[in-house]
Image: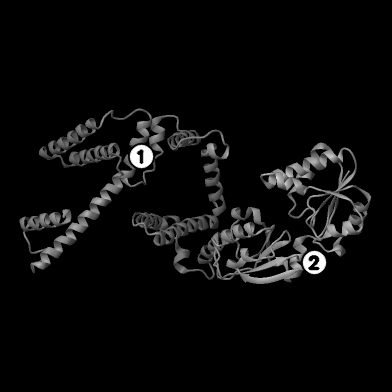
Amino acid sequence: MIHIVGLGPGAVEALTFGAVDALKKYPIYLRTKKHPTVAYLEEEGMRYVSFDHIYEGAKTFEEVYETIKEEVLKKAKEEDLVYAVPGHPLVAEKSVMLLLAACKEEGVAYTLYPAVSFVDTMLEALEIDPIQGLRIVDALDIKKEVPDFKKGTIITQVFSAYVASEVKIALSLYMADEDEIVFVRGAGTKEASIRAMPLYELDRQKDIDDLTSIYIPPMEGRYGFYEFMEIVERLRDKEDGCPWDMEQTHESLKPYLIEESYEALEAIDLQDEEALSEELGDVLLQILLHSTISKEEGMFTIHEVIKKVSEKMVYRHPHVFAKSRDLTAEEVLTQWEDLKKKEKGEARLSDSLQAVSKYYPSLSRAEKIQKKARKYGFDWDHISYVFDKVQEEILEIKEALSEQKEDKAKKELGDLLFAVVNLARFLGADPELSLNQTSDKFIARITKMEALIEAQEETFQALSLSKLDEYWEMAKKEEKN
């Protein structure tokens, strides 16, 4: 029989009669002797074995808890014993949870002796009511957490300056250096210390130890993902929302999704990080608007959107999540395409090509189609054949025009553009970007032309084509200089 005892927050008065009785009756094994209640055990002449030595030899806390579990199980097969832990045995006690699972699996009997937890003492010390919402976070997992500004947050196991520094760095991703936190040491003991301070001072405290926790009060005027989602839903509220937002549909919002995406691309090209953060927010707004509209229609919610894309990422990255084997970047792309084909049932080349959305910009769509065809071996061997194809399409356009077949010439123009996209692919150039760069160059050259024309006190519209050609060449020459 394993008697799993909670030693409470540190005050002897917090021990239950059942816990004291078990401590006096059976051999005691402590997860750690670094706890105020241990002094009481020593005063009462209770002998114990501590597992602190395991911390010194292990590389991770997971290894520590696993080793402790194995040791306790081994001893329990020889005699009844007490396994005692700080606080409540079921609150932030990984070793206990591992031990309970093992006991159930191996049929080992156990009894739990509850105690006042550090959560109880924190609530008392801070005089807060958890019914308003409270999160409890392990400092060792702080990097995995996301903010919830509406609820107070207790961060436990801030047992060293190093851990405090890690917590500060993690919190600084969404809090300002001057934002107030509450430092709580020894809650529930006579030596308790509670003091408010700005975030940046957290790891500068001299009395950080195993009894240290941090409390972050709810913060008004701060926004996380779910706060943003609530804002969008409020905009769509039928009673007091925004008239324009309430009128929008999936169809009416289509231009804005494209527009915001292109503005984000422009910010990337300009290497403007501040603009990019703003434009990505606008893209996210469009995603939430579409998700909110579908939620109202009973179709899907943002949670289903996140679920589907998460499942897709896990499925298409077995080398990451299943750790099947290490892959190169090129092998990852090949695996991605193979999994995507299997997922979408693309058995043939035609299936794969038809899966390319018709709503892509035409140059990008042509490029994607050609890249997919190449994977099936349908491609030129050398760039010289591409040049031949471009020349062939130009001749066919000239021939159609000479025959006064304008409709045929327009169709041949499409063939020419498709061949030019092929040329761009062989050159390793993005046709959309190449054309955009040329458009930018054209605008810049026209701007320079206008400046040259105005310097001669002439106007653009009044000049002949030959004169405009002269200015064009002048602008081109200055551009090269």
Image height of 250 relative to 349, above or below? below
Q: How is the image coloured?
A: one colour
Q: Nearer the viewer, residue 67 or 46?
A: 46
Q: Is residue 224 left or right of residue 193?
A: left
What quarter of the picture does the C terminus occupy? bottom left
Q: Is disc 1 surrounded by few (<14), some (14 to 19) or many (20+) residues within 10 Å?
A: some
Q: Please name the residue shown 69% across and 45% down the image.
A: 62
Residue 412 position, x and y percent, is 21, 38
Q: Nearer the viewer, mark 1 or mark 2?
A: 2
- x and y percentages locating residue 218 in the rendered image: 63, 68
Q: Amino acid at mark 1?
A: Lys
Q: Residue at x 67, y 59 (%)?
A: 158
Amino acid at pointer 2: Thr
| x and y, in percent, of residue 220 in the image | 58, 71
Secondary element under disc 1, as helix, strand or loop, is helix
Specify which label sits upstream in the sequence, 1 or 2. 2
Question: Do the residues bearing badges 1 and 2 touch, measured as CB atoms within 8 Å?
Answer: no
**Quadrant assignment for the N terminus:** top right
Residue visible at 57% across and 52% down in the picture = 303
- Residue 394 visible to the viewer: yes
Along the horizontal axis of the image, is 366 left or right of 200?
left
Residue pointed to by mark 1:
368
Q: 1 or 332, which is in the foreground?
A: 1
Which residue is identified by label 2?
Answer: 189
Mark 1 to mark 2 CA distance (whole Å): 67 Å
- Image quarter of residue 399: top left
Relative vertical location of residue 429 with respect to residue 141 in this rendering, above or below: above
Quarter of the view holding residue 427: top left
x then y, percent, for residue 267: 37, 57
* Residue 128 appears in the rendering: no
